[in-house]
Amino acid sequence: MPLKIARLLQNIGHEVADTFSPRGGFVGKPFHLRFSNFACAQSMTGIIPLLLFIVHGPEHLRVYALAFLGFKITVGALLSALIITRFYPVWIGENGLRARNFWGLARRLDWNEIQHVRMIRWLIVTPVLRITSPKLRDAIWLPLFLDKQAEFGAEVREKVPRGNPLREYFEP
């Protein structure tokens, strides 16, 4: 019994590491996000709530909110965008895709598990494909602002089987 528990914990440890690590055990080609688009989106996520607080919040706290807003827009957004665009690419392999969900957790999806693909605009400047599957509880968000977007589309047309919703999106 203790051996079964140890194996279970080991498997859970690998799943957790795979979820948070940039590559996990996925074999494929990485495609990095375009820095400027992601940095702009990061800035926008902090601007709106803080502007509302500055305008409608307690007067004695507005100066702190303004200072925090300045930090969020400059240092915070740029630093987080630099980390994400460099260390958390989208991976495409022979059998599937590895990308992140809305919360930033890595998800693997085989080509035959893709059910729906829908393009949405997240914060105006960041177009993404929302990919759903019966296998996953939450959708994969595939950014359409990759550094080598045309090359990514070519890889999809080459590797994804015909009739797949993802391939259909990238076909002319």
Image: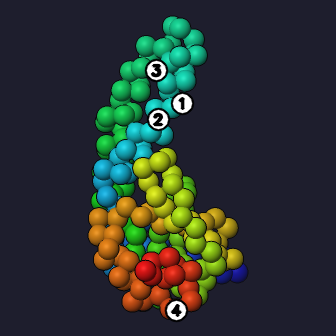
User: Which is closer to the viewer, label 1 or label 3?
Assistant: 1
- 10 Å neighbourhood of mark 2: few (<14), some, or many (≥20)? some
Distance between the alpha carbons at the discs numbered 1 and 2: 6 Å
Q: Which amino acid does label 2 sit on?
A: Gly
Residue that badge 1 annotates: 49
Q: What residue type is labelled 4?
A: Arg
Q: What element carries label 3?
A: helix
List x then y, in percent, for residue 22. 39, 66
Residue that badge 4 annotates: 162
**Could you tell which of marks 1 and 4 lies nearer the N-terminus?**
1
**Could you tell which of marks 3 and 2 lies nearer the N-terminus?**
2
Distance between the alpha carbons at the discs numbered 1 and 3: 10 Å
> Measuring 40% from the left and 39% from the top, which residue is drawn there?
43
List x then y, in percent, for residue 134. 69, 77
- 10 Å neighbourhood of mark 4: few (<14), some, or many (≥20)? few
CB under 8 Å between discs 1 and 3: no
Q: Is mark 4 on a helix, strand or loop?
A: loop
Residue that badge 3 annotates: 65
User: Which is closer to the viewer, label 1 or label 4?
Assistant: 4
Distance between the alpha carbons at the discs numbered 2 and 4: 41 Å
> Measuring 62% from the left and 74% from the top, which residue is drawn there?
116
* Left or right: where 117 falls relative to 68: right
User: Which of the 4 image quadrants contains residue 143?
Assistant: bottom left
**Could you tell which of marks 2 and 4 lies nearer the N-terminus?**
2
Residue that badge 2 annotates: 46
